């Protein structure tokens, strides 16, 4: 029979990072106002904002994960958890 041991619970947090590719249609509202010569350019911030509203073409692909000590330590909700 083994002797009982002492332990302490540590709350961890895992962040999973996924990547995906989207095709953002170029529309009038994504363009900056025309220059003096009539040239128009895409507004990068508007393109990126529009991209976040779309679903990736091939779904989300895992890129990585990170485990860290949770900044707020508290007792487990279930008292039976070791």
Image (cartoon, grey):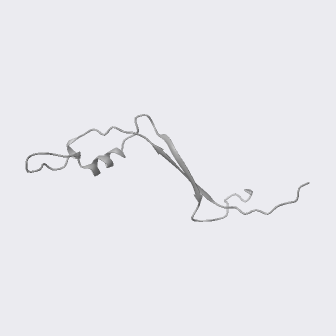
Q: Position of residue 12 (x, y in %)?
A: 61, 58
Instruction: Give the side of residue 61 with respect to residue 4, left or right.
Output: left
Residue 71, by quadrant, is bottom right
Q: Nearer the viewer, residue 47 or 76?
A: 47
Residue 55 sits above or below residue 14 on the image: above
Instruction: Give the side of residue 12 with respect to residue 35, left or right.
Output: right
Instruction: Give the side of residue 63 with respect to residue 42, left or right.
Output: right
Residue 73 sits above or below residue 57 on the image: below
Residue placed at 36% from the left, 39% from the top?
22
Residue 40, by quadrant, is top left
Going by the picture, which residue comes out furthest to the top? 58
Residue 69, by quadrant, is bottom right
Q: Position of residue 26 (x, y in %)?
A: 24, 40
Instruction: Give the side of residue 2 with respect to residue 18, left or right.
Output: right
On-image quarter of the C terminus:
bottom right
Q: Nearer the viewer, residue 55 or 32?
A: 32
Going by the picture, which residue comes out furthest to the right? 1
Q: So how many labels did they put on this image?
A: 0
Residue placed at 13% from the left, 45% from the top?
39
Q: Position of residue 16 (x, y in %)?
A: 53, 48
Q: Position of residue 58 (x, y in %)?
A: 43, 34
Residue placed at 85% from the left, 60% from the top?
4
On-image quarter of the N terminus:
bottom right
């Amino acid at each position: 029979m083994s002797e009982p041991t002492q332990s302490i619970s540590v709350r961890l947090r895992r962040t999973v990072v996924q990547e995906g590719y989207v095709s953002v249609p170029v529309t009038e509202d994504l363009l900056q106002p025309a220059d003096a010569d009539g040239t128009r350019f895409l507004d990068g911030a508007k393109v990126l904002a529009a991209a976040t509203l779309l679903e990736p073409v091939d779904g989300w692909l895992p890129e990585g994960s990170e485990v860290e000590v949770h900044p707020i330590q508290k007792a487990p909700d279930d008292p039976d958890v070791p």
